[in-house]
């Protein structure tokens, strides 16, 4: 049984749907020629169109259209070759037109699917209801002046893709998996950088609860603008508990917009936004229907990169990796390409183990991403090569790896300089074996008496004498030959 | 040489080409006329310095033998709905107080690069919403013909300042905009030619928007030939306007051949309305006879959904306007009336900044789009718009142009028709259907009413067939031989 | 269709326009008479008719993804009733 909240009268399950806003990667804005770069001086990346000067008109950026189609294809979704832009009317200081150009009942992308890779290695499918293109709003700064808010329109009009899921998720973990998977897909596609901390991916979380076993959909509350996976999971836990408490106390959940407070992990009602909202959507008369050909869709389809799901299947089928390992490696495009460099021409399972067990530990300890790894993929590959061709043992390899983490050096150079090369010279090993047997008359007796475990003592002696560099296989083989003789 | 202010575009062009006078002299003459005619309130902002500078530049180009544009040295009034760089632009509204655009609308830029000389910004109904030019924050415009009947008359609207300026000799020609009749109806009231081209012919970029799916700029001139010259200079594809038609411009002036024989002119029976003014009917009948005499075939046609055009228009246009006017919020330009909160500031600014008619239309539009009413009003109106458009498509299978009256009456007195908004809306009964269908229409002065006021006839053409329309209009103009002037001396 | 004062007040708020209390009643009357007149559209059967949003029969033109605009802070702020440090300003918003 999954995520269940114990109520006073019954057990409750939580029903979650997400609306994720992904900032489209493009040079210029959706309907104006101003730049989209992050962090410029206020109101410098603003055209007269973005500032909604009288008589200014929108003209759509073809790249944003292509990016939306691409993302739709990545979500295995229906692409609508005819869609319509609509005005969503409301007043706000950072919305210069007094309406947001969005898409209402005719979005560019229809129903699709996302496969979630759960931590236990199982998969779950979540429906995508739609994806539509719309304009981002500007930014209001409230802490610059005691009496005024300051408005920067640099982000006004940057293209967003709003991706709406079906209410298919049932636990915070599934939501976490959904967000990570969606982020992974848009990053693979290059349609959104997926950086939640910079706000280029943000989500609104719709939560309702219902008694376990029921299939009703109760009133939901929407928590706006959650900007991390962890916060989304926290918001759901808080919301689910809050709503169950309301029902337990005989109350009713009200449909409303709530705000997540990251400092407390709670949500609170945004009553100010509740006042008489009526967006009055209607087709934007400044824009005609967006129409493109099936050929364009096919052309874009042909340029799609391998996506995480296909890559995962390949890792399982071609490399023999476990679904869990494969899922971990494909989750981030950078991790997957790192892994593929390491595994190139080598044992893929071994490569997967080293990346997941050794490298990830280092990265998480240092709190850095794989692109900042002190050990390059080429060098880790070389290290694995040294193990495979018996230049060093696995044990020595771990020492070398630690040195690589500190210095970033080439493992071949480290092995050479530190003289860590495995001794495979039979003569040298034989001398050490002979010395061990000679020194251990008592242990020889025990061995002959049937205590085979004592063999380890001889191995230890040989390793000590060779500073661990003797090839363990050869040591074992020689010891047995001599003792059994 | 006749008085410079009695010339039209074509004759001034000849005079300039022959060196009979300079563009600067022409501009000076009109600046004097403009100052002398201030009583009409035709201009919100006079720009004599701009006019003289551009006139001198035009003279320089001519002297140097540079390329000369179609409107070289022609002094015009610019409806104050076109944003003009560095020149106050008001849309006739308090809410745009002090707004000086940092850009030039495509239409005014096109005219400028064709050599036109801007005399000033012409008065208009607030945000082009009105049929009498009485809703302007800058006061009503007087029709120059009022002097003849000794009464303050409206010039029609919304391009009332433009019409009055041309009619009163305060500009050689003027720009107008037409959403439901705002060029054609004032042209009819003031005895001039006014043309709304096909939707998409003139760029809307930089023109203050009223109803985006209907707004079109067009020329307001003394003659049909002038309209052809000026339209050629204003129009053309503009990539900055997504609804601008990507079609090459024909030579409109050359389309006027004087030969209209064999063309079929449709007479829509639904335009013969109950209670129609006998004078208007007589004028229309006269127009039919004139065209017949010019060799046209006359054919009765049916546009069955005509009576639904006005109510359709009064959903579609206000709905679009309610969103188009949301940007006037006191944040980035224009009037700001302080308030305790953001909402308070919005409410105060928009409450004070908009006049009653604009408020009415914003409220109607907001209501028509609001939850629960969207289908019953907005979608319904859009569907009826389809039917109206289909009426015209069917009619144009059989005819080359359609002849109707332009307006149901001659100019009326300032203060009349003001109590009942719907009565005022009826002024556009003959012009609105064309606007909804996006078709070109032109009003040609045809004669005088019994009381001595001008009456216009409207011709409607096929989409992007302004050439034929202008040719028929020219034939009508020739037959009507309308050469009356306002001001009493005749 | 008749609009009452409260409805007019609600719409006026949606449109963020202050309407004086004593003007609500007459305005409700005017708007109601306009809506009554518009009501005649309901007598038309429009089942199966496509709504017409635009008279243009061309499709939406698209532009290249090139930065061609912006970098005009002065022009953007030129007409602002109140601005500071490159920002527009409004009465403080409390969220």
Image: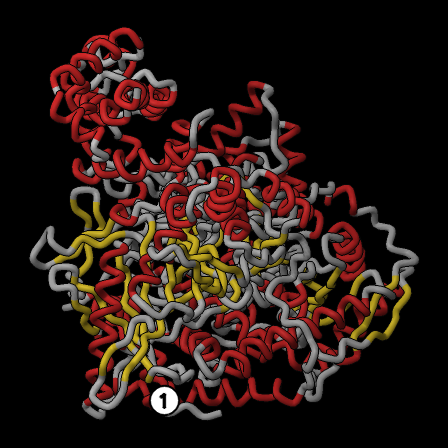
Question: Which is more toward the observer, B87 or C93?
Answer: C93
Q: Quadrant of residue A404?
A: top left
Residue found at x 42% / y 83%: A215
Residue found at x 57% / y 24%: B62
Question: Quarter of the image containing the C terminus of chain A?
Answer: top left
Q: Viewed as shown, does residue B82 lie left or right of A403?
A: right
Q: Quadrant of residue A375?
A: top left
Height in image: C71 above or below B384?
A: above
* Badge 1 element: helix
Height in image: A7 above or below A184?
A: below
Residue that carries the numbered disc 1 in the rendered image: C26
Question: Quarter of the image containing the N terminus of chain A?
Answer: bottom left
Residue found at x 26% / y 46%: A198
Q: Position of residue B118 (x, y in %)?
A: 48, 43
Q: Position of residue B240 (x, y in %)?
A: 52, 44
Height in image: A149 above or below A41?
A: below
């Amino acid at each position: 049984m999954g995520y269940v909240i114990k109520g006073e009268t019954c057990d409750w399950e939580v029903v979650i749907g997400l609306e994720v806003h992904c900032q489209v990667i493009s040079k210029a804005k959706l309907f104006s020629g101003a730049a989209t770069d992050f962090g410029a001086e206020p109101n410098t990346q603003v055209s007269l169109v973005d500032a909604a000067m009288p008589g200014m008109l929108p003209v759509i950026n073809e790249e944003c259209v292509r990016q939306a189609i691409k993302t739709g294809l990545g979500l295995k979704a229906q692409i609508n070759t005819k869609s319509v832009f609509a005005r969503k009317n409301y007043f706000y200081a950072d919305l210069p037109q007094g309406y947001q150009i969005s898409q209402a009942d005719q979005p560019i992308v229809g129903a699709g699917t996302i496969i979630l890779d759960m931590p236990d290695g199982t998969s779950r499918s979540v429906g995508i209801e739609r994806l539509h293109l719309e304009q981002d709003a500007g930014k209001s700064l409230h802490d610059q002046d005691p009496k005024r808010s300051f408005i920067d329109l640099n982000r006004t009009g940057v293209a967003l893709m709003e991706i709406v899921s079906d209410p298919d998720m049932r636990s915070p973990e599934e939501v976490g998996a959904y967000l990570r998977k969606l982020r992974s897909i848009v990053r693979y596609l290059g349609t959104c950088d997926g950086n939640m901390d910079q706000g280029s991916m943000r989500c609104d979380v719709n939560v309702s609860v219902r008694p376990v076993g029921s299939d009703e959909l109760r009133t939901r509350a929407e928590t706006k603008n959650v900007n991390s996976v962890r916060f989304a999971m926290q918001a759901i836990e808080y919301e689910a508990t809050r709503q169950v408490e309301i029902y337990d106390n005989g109350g009713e959940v009200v449909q409303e917009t709530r705000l997540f407070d990251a400092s407390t992990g709670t949500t609170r009602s945004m009553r100010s936004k509740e006042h008489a909202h009526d967006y009055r959507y209607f087709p934007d008369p400044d824009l005609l229907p967006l129409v493109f050909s099936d050929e364009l869709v096919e052309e874009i389809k042909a340029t799609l990169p391998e996506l995480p799901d296909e890559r995962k299947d390949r890792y399982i089928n071609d490399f023999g990796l476990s679904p869990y390992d494969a899922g971990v490696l494909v989750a981030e495009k950078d991790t997957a390409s790192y892994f593929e460099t390491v595994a190139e021409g080598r044992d893929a399972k071994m490569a997967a183990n080293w990346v997941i067990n050794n490298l990830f530990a280092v990265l998480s300890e240092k709190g850095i991403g794989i692109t900042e790894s002190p050990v390059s993929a080429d060098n880790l590959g070389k290290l694995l090569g040294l193990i495979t061709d018996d230049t060093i043992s696995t044990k020595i390899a771990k020492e070398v790896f630690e040195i690589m983490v500190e210095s970033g050096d080439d493992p071949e150079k480290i092995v050479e300089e530190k003289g860590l090369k495995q001794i495979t010279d039979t003569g040298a090993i034989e001398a050490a074996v002979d010395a061990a047997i000679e020194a251990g008359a008592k242990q020889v007796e025990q061995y002959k008496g049937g205590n085979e475990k004592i063999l380890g003592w001889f191995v230890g002696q040989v390793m000590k004498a060779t500073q661990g560099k003797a090839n363990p296989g050869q040591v074992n083989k020689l010891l047995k030959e001599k003792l059994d003789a | 040489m006749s008085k410079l202010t009695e010339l039209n575009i074509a004759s001034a062009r000849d005079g300039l080409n022959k060196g009979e006078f300079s563009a600067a002299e022409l501009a000076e003459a009109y600046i004097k006329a403009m100052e002398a005619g201030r009583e009409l309130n035709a201009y919100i902002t006079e720009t004599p310095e701009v006019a003289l500078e551009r006139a001198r530049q035009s003279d320089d180009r001519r002297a140097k033998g540079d390329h000369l544009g179609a409107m070289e040295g022609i002094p015009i009034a610019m409806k104050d709905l076109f944003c003009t760089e560095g020149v106050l632009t008001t849309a006739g509204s308090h809410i745009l107080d002090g707004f000086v655009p940092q850009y030039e609308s495509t239409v005014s830029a096109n005219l400028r690069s064709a050599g036109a000389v801007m005399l000033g910004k012409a008065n208009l109904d607030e945000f082009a919403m009105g049929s009498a030019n009485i809703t302007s924050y800058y006061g009503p415009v007087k029709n120059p013909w009022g002097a003849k009947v000794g009464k303050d008359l409206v010039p029609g609207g919304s391009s009332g300042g433009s019409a009055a300026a041309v009619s009163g000799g305060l500009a050689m020609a003027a720009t107008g905009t037409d959403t439901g009749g705002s060029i054609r109806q004032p042209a009819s009231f003031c005895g001039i030619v006014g043309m709304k081209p096909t939707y998409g012919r003139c760029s809307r970029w930089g023109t203050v928007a009223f109803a985006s799916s209907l707004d079109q700029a067009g020329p307001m001139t003394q003659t049909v030939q002038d309209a052809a010259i000026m339209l050629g200079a204003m129009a053309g594809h503009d990539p900055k306007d997504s609804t601008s038609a990507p079609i090459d411009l024909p030579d409109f002036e050359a389309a006027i051949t004087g030969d209209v024989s064999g063309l079929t002119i449709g007479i829509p029976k639904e335009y013969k309305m109950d209670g129609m003014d006998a004078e208007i009917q007589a004028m229309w009948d006269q127009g039919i006879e004139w065209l017949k005499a010019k060799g046209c075939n006359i054919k009765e046609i049916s546009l069955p959904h005509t009576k639904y055009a006005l109510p359709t228009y009064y959903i579609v246009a206000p709905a679009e306007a309610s969103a188009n006017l949301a940007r006037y919020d006191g944040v980035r330009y224009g009037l700001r009336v302080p308030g305790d909160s953001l909402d308070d500031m919005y409410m105060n600014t928009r409450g004070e900044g908009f006049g009653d008619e604009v408020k009415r239309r914003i409220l109607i539009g907001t209501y028509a789009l609001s939850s629960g009413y969207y289908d019953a009003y907005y979608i319904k109106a859009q569907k009826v718009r389809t039917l109206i458009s289909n009426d015209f498509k069917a009619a144009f299978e059989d005819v080359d142009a359609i002849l109707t009256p332009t307006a149901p009456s001659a100019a009326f007195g300032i203060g009349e028709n003001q109590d009942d908004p719907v009565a005022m809306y009826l002024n556009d009964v003959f012009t609105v259907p064309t606007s909804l269908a996006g078709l070109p229409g032109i009003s040609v002065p045809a004669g005088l009413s019994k009381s001595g006021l001008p009456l216009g006839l409207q011709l409607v053409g096929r989409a992007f067939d302004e050439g034929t329309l202008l040719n028929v209009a020219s034939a009508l103009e020739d037959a009507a031989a309308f050469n009356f002037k306002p001001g009493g001396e005749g | 269709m008749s609009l009452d004062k409260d409805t007019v007040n609600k719409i006026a708020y949606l449109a963020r326009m202050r309407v004086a209390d004593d003007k609500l009643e007459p305005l409700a009357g005017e708007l109601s008479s306009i809506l009554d007149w518009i009501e005649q559209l309901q007598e038309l059967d429009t089942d199966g008719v496509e709504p017409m949003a635009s008279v243009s029969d061309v499709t939406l033109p698209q532009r290249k993804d090139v930065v061609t605009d912006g970098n005009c802070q002065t022009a953007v702020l030129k007409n602002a009733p109140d601005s500071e440090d490159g920002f527009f300003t409004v009465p403080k918003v409390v969220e």
